[in-house]
Amino acid sequence: MATMNKTSVREEIERLKQEFEQLCSAGKVSPETRVVMKSLLVVVELILAVFLEKKTRKDSKNSSIPPSQTPKNETATSGLSKGKGKKVFGEVNNTRTKETVIIARVTTCTACGAPLDETPCHGHERRTKIDIVFEKVVEHIDAEIKQCPNCAAKVKGHFPQDMPGKLQYGNGIKAFAIHLVISQMGG
């Protein structure tokens, strides 16, 4: 199997990222290309992290070494548990989820241009983006919905451009899905 110098691969990726950033700051890259390239760079970095750092320890399950000659697994529990484990009811709190709610404020009527700063909010419409960045990150954007007292038009706050529908997945979860596809094809 061919080997490669981990440092030189990482340095080359870093050099490419810097060149791309220079092109972006010079205005030579369109916003669409920038998003695609940044996503691809995330995937490449994920692949580097997985394939250049992955080391599977040999034990009795993946080699011909008998269990008595493999090193003790320090992460395993101390043998007190028997069976299939403790039955857990309700929410499991061993995951890290960071959840935020951002309010997209309505300040002016899009129909007539009247200021709506002092107008009460009649409700919210929610869009949600779920992503994985070493922890699950859930970001909610609540857009205010107001009725203009001047022309009676219903006006809604603006959502970010990367949230066109009710639910989106971020770059981290997309990269993870690509990783799963690649690892299944490679093995």
Image: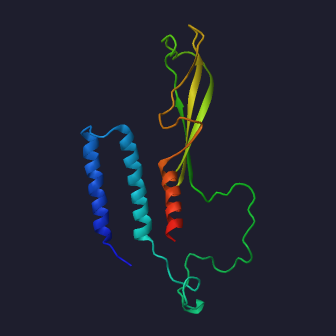
Colouring rule applied to residues: rainbow
Task: Specify whether 62 is left or right of 6.
Answer: right
Q: Is residue 16 above or below residue 56?
A: above
| Residue 132 in sight here | no
Q: Quadrant of residue 32?
A: top left
From the top left corner, tell me how far across and down residue 150 is, in percent: 56, 7
State whether residue 58 is above or below residue 106: below
Please state if 41 lies on the left or on the right of 67 as rendered: left
Residue in the foreground of this view, choosing between 1 and 140? 1
Query: Compared to 184, does 26 lie above or below?
Result: above
Q: Residue furthest front?
A: 185
- Location of the N terminus by quadrant is bottom left
Q: Give how far across and how far down residue 35 sits, in percent.
A: 40, 43
Q: Quadrant of residue 14?
A: bottom left
Measured along the vertical axis of the image, is residue 32 above or below residue 96?
above
Quadrant in the picture for residue 68: bottom right
Using the image as rendered, state which of residue 175 and residue 187 is in the foreground: 187
Q: Position of residue 95 (x, y in %)?
A: 60, 57
Q: Is residue 73 left or right of residue 17?
A: right
Task: Measuring from the top left, give residue 13's x and y in whole percent.
Answer: 31, 59
User: Residue farthest to the top?
Assistant: 150
- Residue 95 can be seen in this image: yes
Number of labels in the image equals: 0
**At 26% from the left edge and 44% from the top edge, which residue is drawn?**
23
Q: Residue at x 63, y 79 (%)?
A: 78
